[in-house]
Amino acid sequence: MRADRLVATLLLMQARGRVTAAELARELEVSNATARRDLEALSAAGVPVYPQPGRGGGWSLVGGARTDLSGLSSAEAQALFLVAGPAASVAPQIKSALRKLVRALPQTFRAEAEAAAEATIVDPAGWGEVTLDRPGLVSALQQAVVKQVQVRLTYRKRGEEPRERVVDPWGLVDKDGLWYFIAGTNEGRRTFRLDRVTAVAFTDTPASRPADFELAGAWGEVVTAVEEKRSETSASVLVPTRFLKVFQHQHGRHCTVVEDRGEYTRVELTAPRPLDIARNVAGWGGLITVESPEVAEHLARIGAELVSRYPRAAPGGPAGS
């Protein structure tokens, strides 16, 4: 008997007080025989459920208890469905699970839970962008994490030939459509980009995972390390205050306000190299003033290249005539 069906059966009995095998089969989308076997197995396992004989009988919990076994309050149920609901639009399994859970909730919770599940849709593509497809290996690696078995991973680093290694699966991260796999290796914890993984094979070896490992904390360390590497160069830039929010939105965490000077605001901009900063701000043209000489030199070179490639059109004639 599947554990998810066991929990759903108990929740239904708690919510309704009494169910028949036919009702249970209909709610959980299984056969009558399967539902009856599940109820008998629960009773044999020591769960206090018993059949009521006679016409219109069914199965009940001892004492007729009606407490919700999940322990969810109305607010907690809404919060659960608000989080899980958006995923149901792209994952049929989640949609099916939510439908079953709604049926298992106490009657007074159901309407708000259903509304919460349909309250939000997540569109992961930005304006003018296409939605990134979820890598096909995500499901396999999720199963490896859940089952805690080692996997044989074929990984291709940039500019190198694919290399095979056996790793302990610890967790996956979806970073704005780009997936990462965190795993334990002989060299310690490593982070792999899923778009560079070419093959995954399960082994029969149990995986090991530190008792104090916490995925969110580990990913936070990865983000900090990557952002520090992406911020090795800094430049001072004067930005018109009226355009400051646009400039900050464009450069995110790599733009820090240093000084408000009224009409202009001085910010510090960071990137891996001075050339990267120049490329990032070149489109702002004369609206901004770059105070860092090295970045200014790159901007001058970029400007000269553009003028050479696109000379100003002569009056009355096409460019370059």
Image (cartoon, grey):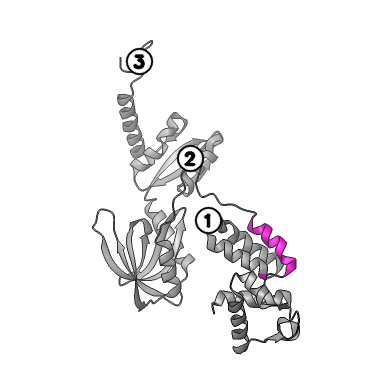
Q: Residues within 10 Å of mark 2 (few under 14, many from 20)?
A: few
Residue farthest to the left?
A: 161
Question: Is residue 120 visible from the viewing direction of this image?
Answer: yes
The type of residue carrying mark 1 is Val
Q: Position of residue 97 (x, y in %)?
A: 58, 66
Magenta part of the protein: which range?
104-120
Work out whether 102 lies above or below 282.
Answer: below
Q: In the image, what residue type sits under mark 3?
A: Pro
Q: Return the x and y of residue 112 as percentages of the image width and height.
A: 71, 61
Question: What residue does disc 3 label?
Answer: 318
Mark 2 = which residue?
A: 128
Q: Amino acid at mark 2?
A: Gly
Residue toward you, 303 or 135? 135
Cα–Cα gap, marks 3 and 1:
52 Å
Disc 2 or disc 1, which is closer to the eye?
1
Corner quadrant of residue 268: top left
Drawn side of residue 136 relative to residue 35, left or right: left
Residue 169 is situated, as x and y percent measured from the top left of the image, at 39, 70
Residue 70 visible, this orientation: no
**Mark 2 to mark 1: distance in Å?**
21 Å
Mark nearest the camera among 3 and 2 is 2
Residue 100: mark in rendering = none
What secondary structure is marked by label 3? loop
Residue 90: numbered disc:
1
Q: Secondary structure at mark 1?
A: loop
Picture residue at 45% right of the left edge, 77% below the top: 211
Q: CA distance from mark 3 to mark 2?
A: 32 Å
Please give the name of the residue rendered at 73% of the width and 74% of the height, measured from the top-left corner. Answer: 16
The residue carrying pointer 3 sits among few (fewer than 14), some (14 to 19) or many (20 or more) residues within 10 Å by Cα, namely few
Residue 145, placed above or below residue 220:
below
